[in-house]
Image (cartoon, rainbow, N blue to C red):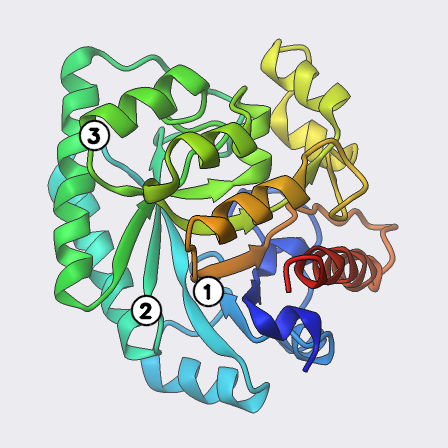
Amino acid sequence: MTATSKVHVAAAPISWGVCEVPGWGRVLDAATVLGEMRELGVQATELGPPGYLPRDPAELRELLGKYDLRLVGGFLAVVLHADQAKALEEAEESAALFAACGGDVLVLAAATGLDGYDERPKLSDTEWATLVGTAGKIRDIAGQHGLRTVLHPHVGTHVEQQAEVERFLADSDLGLCLDTGHLMIGGTDPVELAKRFPERVGHVHLKDVREDLAADVRAGRLGYTDAVGRGIYTPLGEGDVDVASMVRSVQAAGYDGWYVLEQDTALGDSSPDDLPRRDTERSLAHLAKIIDSLY
């Protein structure tokens, strides 16, 4: 038994540069991405952006089965503060797909409605209340399909900064996707958050981050997309997030969900095709050391 087989470890296509943002970078084909996941010993994957993997349940199950991968669920970034009917329709479609393919979690983000994650209009109190209410309705829809819903604090969405994370925790009963990278970039210490609210950790995205670039993003000196291109995300153990303390904390609190390796990558024309695989392999090796220290 390998160290990482003692916990549930998954990956996501974004670690291979597959992103929904227009002009993000070069996109590797699904056969390469899924094949490398499986070769690295990853057990499962999140779905990735709409249109990358099949949206037909039978086709998706067949494709994932070819690589012996499970579906964890997927990321759904929708506008929660306006046009509630549209958000609920999108949630219904995604929840049905995730459930039909064996997924168990819907990872929800409060999209701004703008392309990308570099601009963030301010919400009114009324819009915030709508956001919270819509998230709750999506939780109910996903629950009807047997899925859990977690809110993902994410750079460039309406739940990004520490004050917004705290406000959401106070105003909603949804669990959180503890994304170590996005939380840190937004100004929240993921280790302290996990210690303060262990009962709210419903899903984990593992990232490591260069704090120097994160500080530039927080201060508005650098756009998020540019920061990704400059390497704000590093393999686990090579940045400034205390990944080991966070894992130990949530494990001690009884967390038994997925750890999804999700290191946002943008591949340029000259980026080596094997860069995502090499970085993911290094992250898996670091995670294995952490897990070994727990058992």
Q: Secondary structure at mark 3?
A: helix
- In-image side of 270 versus 102 (left or right): right
Image quadrant containing the C terminus: bottom right
Amino acid type at mark 1: Leu
Please tell me which of labels 1 and 3 falls first in the chain: 1
Residue ID at (44%, 25%): 160
Residue 64 location, x and y as percent? Answer: 50, 82
Q: Is residue 219 above or below residue 14?
A: above
Check contact, mark 1 vs mark 2: CB within 8 A: yes
Q: Is residue 257 visible?
A: yes
Residue ID at (28%, 27%): 168
Q: Is residue 123 above or below residue 82?
A: above
Neighbourhood count class around disc 1 (C-alpha, 10 Å): few under 14, some 14–19, many 20 upward:
many
Residue ID at (34%, 77%): 102
Residue 43 location, x and y as percent? Answer: 57, 76
Number of labels in the image equals 3
| Residue 47 numbered mark, or none | 1
- In-image side of 122 versus 117 (left or right): left
Q: Is residue 286 above or below residue 23?
A: below
Q: Quadrant of residue 54?
A: bottom left
- In-image side of 203 versus 17 (left or right): left
Viewer-closest of 196 and 28: 196
Q: Secondary structure at mark 2?
A: helix
Q: Which residue matches tag 2? A: 98
Q: Which residue matches tag 3? A: 131
| Residue 160 numbered mark, or none | none
Q: Secondary structure at mark 1?
A: loop
Q: CA distance from mark 1 to mark 2?
A: 8 Å
Amino acid type at mark 3: Leu
Residue 58 location, x and y as percent? Answer: 35, 86
